[in-house]
Amino acid sequence: MNWPSWMLWGFIATLIMTTVEAGSQELGLTRVDFPYLVGTIFTPDRDRAKVYGFIAHVMNGWVISLVYILVFESLHQAAWWLGAIIGVIHALFVLMVVLWMMPGLHPRMASEQHGPTATRQLEPPGVFGLNYGIRTPLSVLLSHTLFGIILGSFYHLHSRGGL
């Protein structure tokens, strides 16, 4: 495995994915703010939640990029199209599993069954995150596919013959 290449391109891909997600929200394509959602797991303070969530989201993305790299290494191939395929799978996992589990894991998120309370005021994402807007799945698909394309395009496989 090429550790320096993973560290560089995993970090860059994560920053770009996070920027695309934030841009999607700013353009009104979705109401979901992943760093904010993650940050509110750690604190009810809205301003600090954004900072904590950004840090956690970047660290999480960086670690998840390692899964992509392991796939590239196991297949002995890194390519933009392979990264895109993994990115689509990753996006579908986020939309169908992670968002579905959020109300059960998040201490400040209401659930579809129980609704909001004094401490659980965040809206649950709903199926495919549609409670955050009809274009939320498109935003998640775009950002995660771009994440994979960047990794597949720029990660350099570890050479077997050298150091």
Image (cartoon, grey):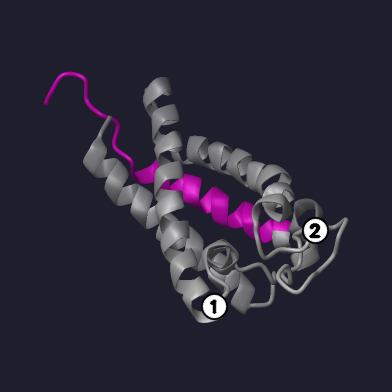
Image quadrant where one finds the C terminus: top left
The answer to whether one can see residue 42 in this image is yes
Question: Which amino acid is tagged 2?
Answer: Ser
Viewer-closest of 148 and 79: 148
The residue where tag 2 is placed is: 111
| Closest to the observer, 147 or 60 | 60
> On the image, numbered disc 1 is attached to which residue?
45
Q: Secondary structure at mark 2?
A: loop
- As displayed, is residue 69 above or below residue 142? above
Please report the bounds of the magenta region as a residue range.
137-163
Residue at the outermost right position: 113
- Say which residue appears at 40% left-offset and 54% top-offset: 59
Residue 133 appears in the figure: no
Three-letter residue code for mark 1: Asp
Quadrant in the picture for residue 158? top left
Mark 2 nearby-residue class (10 Å; few <14, some 14–19, many ≥20): many
Residue 123, percent from left and from top: 76, 67
The N terminus appears in which quarter of the rendering? top left
Is residue 140 a member of the stretch shown in magenta?
A: yes
Q: Could you tell me which residue is drawn at 22 percent across and 25 percent down?
A: 159
Seen in the picture, residue 144 relative to 69 is either above or below; the reply is below
Q: Mark 2 or mark 1, which has the lower sequence index? A: 1
Label 1 crowd bin: few (<14), some (14–19), many (20+), radius 10 Å: few
Image height of 13 relative to 163, above or below: below
Label 2, label 1: how far apart the Cα atoms are: 21 Å
Left or right, residue 160 beside residue 65: left
Q: Position of residue 29 (x, y in %)?
A: 69, 71
**Toward which corner of the image does residue 133 lie, by quadrant?**
bottom right
> Is residue 81 found inside the magenta-colored segment of the image?
no
* Image spot of residue 109 (x, y percent): 71, 63
**Image coords of residue 40 (percent x, y):** 57, 67
